[in-house]
Amino acid sequence: MKTYAVIGLGKFGFHIAKGLAEQGMDIIAIDNDAHKIQDISEFIEDAVVLDSTDIRALKEAGVVGLDTVIISIGENIEASILTLMALKELENKTIIAKAITLTHGEILARLGAFKVIYPERESAKKLVENLVGNVVIDQIDFSSTIKIAKLIATRSLIGKTIGEVETEFEGEIHLIACKTRDNWQFSLEKSYKIREGDMLSFIGKKAFIEKLRSLAKHESA
């Protein structure tokens, strides 16, 4: 089983750690605040109070050569950077780091973070998209080459059959679910005609999902 470490247990880090634990993952949760460790201990057995910039403390806690480590340190940019450097020295494989600013994110990326995330910015972006009626609701990276997109049926999709839409995208996307008239359906026939208001979930190669997303955004503009 893969072992994950989550460093920094603010709201974002807490929910990441809790969510991974609920999925049955092996988790090491770390924070320098004993109260936060006490809160997460309800869900995670291996929760440790320590200074994550201290390479010896990380090593003693078992944060060495792990599959994935998430750095979710709040406003302390210096601690975030020093933690990343310590994790790299301890040969942890995939390090995902939360950034507060673009400059902070650029530094983390240059120091070797596999992925830099901006939770507050992404949350704001999604809220704005929904408020202005953007038809693209969500998208998820399923793997390095496959993506899932969930969207409201656009003008160019309404009236077409599922088979016609899939053919338009060279058979590289497939409908996996459709919410129509408040009911989710997962085994629609290729002859089903998409209706106004349908919510559609497609899976497919990234390039084709991005093309679908671009068309949807263009129609909503």
Image: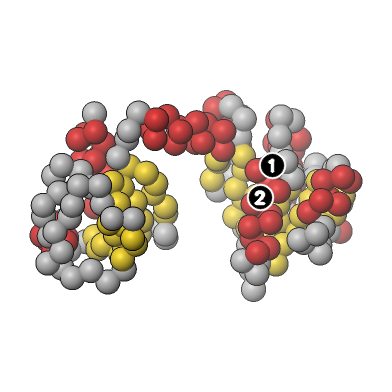
Q: Residue 147 location in percent, x, y? A: 36, 56
- Up-down: is 201 above or below 108? below
The structure residue drawn at horizontal position 59% and vertical position 27%, both measured from the top left corner, is: 101
Q: Is residue 46 visible?
A: yes
* Res. 128 image quadrant: top left
Please tell me the numbered disc located at residue 15.
2
The amino acid type, in three-letter code, at marker 2 is His
The amino acid type, in three-letter code, at marker 1 is Lys
Q: Residue 135 location in percent, x, y? A: 30, 40
The structure residue drawn at horizontal position 82% and vertical position 46%, both measured from the top left corner, is: 36
> For this rendering, which residue is in front, 67 or 137?
137
Q: Is residue 51 visible?
A: no
Category of crowding for the residue at label 2, using alpha-carbon neighbours closer than 10 angstroms: few (below 14), some (14–19), many (at least 20): few
* Res. 183 image quadrant: bottom left
Q: Is residue 98 left or right of residue 160?
A: right
- Up-down: is 133 above or below 34? above
Task: Say what secondary structure mark 1 lies in.
Answer: helix
Q: Are marks 2 and 1 in contact (CB under 8 Å)?
A: yes
Q: Is residue 123 left or right of residue 74?
A: left
Q: Residue 91 location in percent, x, y? A: 68, 56
Spot the residue most to the front.
181
Label 2, label 1: how far apart the Cα atoms are:
6 Å
According to the picture, the residue beneath numbered tag 1 turns out to be 11
- Up-down: is 63 above or below 186? above
